[in-house]
Amino acid sequence: MKEVTSFVMKGNLKSKYILLVPIILIVFMVTLLTINSQQSGATSQELQDTFDHRKETVNFLIGNLLNKKSHLGLPEEQQIALDSLLVQEEYLKDITTKLGIGDLNISTENLAYLKEYNLYENYDFINYNNTKLLEVEQLKAATLQRHDLTYTEQETPYNTALFSKQLFQIVFSPFTAFLFLLIFIYKLISDDQNRTFEFFKVISLSNITVYYGYLMPFLILLLTYTILASFLSLLPPIVTGNLGMIHYPIEVVIDTDTLLVPVWKWLLYLPIGWGIFVSLMLVLAICLFKYRISFSFLIAIIAFPIVIAYIWSVHFGFHAVNPIHLIVLYEKQLLDPNRFITYLVGMLILLIICFAACYPVFKSKRTVLRTSFFSHARKRYVPKPKWKLLQFEQIKKKRKGHVIFTFIMLVGIIGGTFVVVNQAFQKLPTIYLDVIEDFQNILIDQQVQWKVIEEEFDLEAEKMKSSSEESKDKSTEFPEENPYSIMIKDIENKYNNLEGLKDEIGSIDFSKKYREIMESSQSYKELDPSMWNVTVMASEEQQRILDEKNITPWPIGYQWISHFNDPSYAVDSVHYNLMKSSQERNTKLKCTPIVRHNLTIGGVFFYV
C-alpha cells in the first residue's frame, strides 16, 4: 500500500493545478477582507440607535416625573423610581458617549445599567424595555466582561474571529465538499482510462493494496486542505491580536428562546464535520468505482442518499445517526449544548466502520456491476421502418450517457429549488420571533406614551379637585376612572397575546393565529379618508382576491408594499428600519399560484 500511496501522491503533487488551491484561497480571503473592512459599522450603528432610543425614553420619563413633583409632589415609590431613572440616565450617557467616538467597550456600563433597570422594575412604575430581550443582552454583556472582550461587528467582520467563522462557513461548505468529490471522481476515471490500476495489478499488487493505497493520498490532501484553510482563515485575528474573540457569544434562536453560542464552537465543529463528511463520500465513491460504474451514474448514486438524508432531517428533525448534520442544519441541535463532541465522535466511528466495510468490497474479484440498466445501452441497433433517425439518436445518447446526465441535471435543479425554498421556511420561526418582538417593542413605546398621558391626566384631575374643594363648587364632575387606563390595559392585553403567540411558534395552525392577531379586522373604508393610501387599500383588496381564489398567502407578511412604503423614501434611520423590516416580512417567497388582476381603487390603477 505504501508504494501505491507514494506513486499517487507524487502524481498529485506534480500537477500544476495543486498550487492554485492556496492562491485561490488567499485571493478570496483578501477580497472578502477588503469588502468587509469597507462595509463595517452596522453593529455599531445598531447599538447607537438602541441606546439613543433608551436615553430619549428615560429623559422623557424623568421630565414627566419632575413636572409632577414640582406641582403635586411624588409618592415614595415614584421618588425612588425617579432616582433610579437619573442613575440610568448617567449610565446611558456614558454608553452613548463611548459609542459616539467608536468605542464599543461598553459591557461594564451596560451591565451596570441593566442591573439598575432590574431594580427599577420592582418600583411598579413605567417599564420601557422588553424584559426577555434584556435577559439575553445581560448574559451577552456578562460573557464579554468575563472574557475581557468588547462588542464587535457581527454582520461584516474583518479582523476578529467572527471573520474566521464567516470564512469557515464558506471554505467548509457543502459546495466545497461536492467540488472535492467531483475532483476525486474525475481523477479516478482519468487514472482508470490511463490504465493506472492495470499497471498496479501487473506489478502483482492486490486489490486491497491498490484501492486502499489510492484512497490514502486523497485523504491526506483533504487533511492538508483543512489545515491550510483553517490556518489562513485564522490568520487575520492572529495578526491583529483578536484571537480572544473566539469566546464572543452569538445569538442562536431555538424555537422561541435565544441562546448564546461562542464562536469557537463553529471553528471547531465546521472543519472536523466537513472533513468526516467528505471522507465518507470518498469511501463510498471508490467502493462504487470498484464496479466500473460510469461517471454520471456514480455521482447520482452518491447524491441520492445525501438528498434523502437532507429531506429526512427537514421532515423529522435532528437524528444523531444522520450524517447530513455534519455540513448543514447543525446550529440549533448541536452547537448550543456540548453534545456536538459526542456527535462528531459517533460520525468518526461510522467512518472507521465504513473503512472496515470496504475490505470485502476491495477483495472481491468481481469488477463489473452488470444490470439490465446497463445492458440495454449496448444492444445492437436494429432499425425499424418508422422513426429511424429518432431511434438512432436515442441509442447514441444512451451510449454517451446523455440521458443519465440530463436526469442528473433535472434532479439537481429540482433538489436545489427544494433546498432554497426549504431554507426560507427553516428561517420562518426566527422571522416570526423577530416580527413579534418588534411589535412588542412598538407596544412598549406606546404604553410609555399613554402612561405618561395617564399621569398627566391624574395630575390635572387632582388640580381640578383641589380647586373645586377650595371654591366649594360641587357642580364639577370628575371621571371615576382614567380613560387612558383603558388604552393601557388594551395594550397590555395585546402584549400578553403576543407573548402567548411565541409559545405557538411551530404549531400547525400558527399562521392562522398569527394573522388573526396581527391583521386588523377593520376595513380601510371605515377609516377616515385621510388615512387611505395605496398600501392599505391594495393590501385589503389583495387579501380579498386570495380568499376568493383559495390561495394560501405568505404566512408572515400580509401587506402589499407600494412606493409609499419603500425604504428609500424614509425620512430618518428609525423610519428606514421600520419600512425595511416591513418590506422583508412581506416578500413573497412561498411557491403558490400567482394571480394577476387589474385593480382600480380611487382612480389608481395597478396590478396584483
Image (cartoon, grey):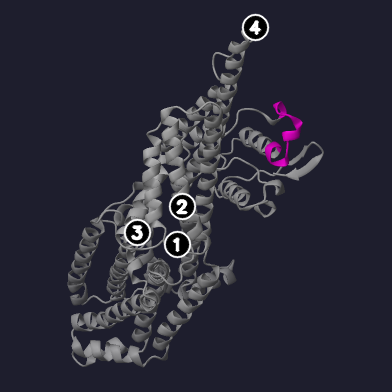
**What's the CA distance linking mark 1 and mark 4?**
61 Å
| Residue 457 seen anywhere in this rendered image of the structure | yes
**What's the CA distance linking mark 3 and mark 2?**
35 Å
Question: What residue is shown with label 2?
Answer: 422
For the C terminus, give its image quadrant.
top right
Counting residues from the start of the chain, the first of labels 4 and 2 encountered is 2
> Considering the numbered disc 3 on the image, is that residue within a helix, a strand or a loop?
helix
1 vs 2, front mark: 1
Q: Amino acid at mark 1?
A: Leu
> What segment carries the magenta color?
525-537
Counting residues from the start of the chain, the first of labels 3 and 2 encountered is 3
In the image, residue 532 lies in the stretch drawn in magenta: yes
Q: Which mark is residue 337?
A: none
Counting residues from the start of the chain, the first of labels 3 and 1 encountered is 1
Question: What residue is shown with label 3?
Answer: 144
Q: Residue at x 79, y 41 (%)?
A: 604
Question: What residue is shown with label 4?
Answer: 475
Q: Amino acid at mark 2?
A: Asn
Q: Amino acid at mark 3?
A: Leu
3 vs 4, front mark: 4
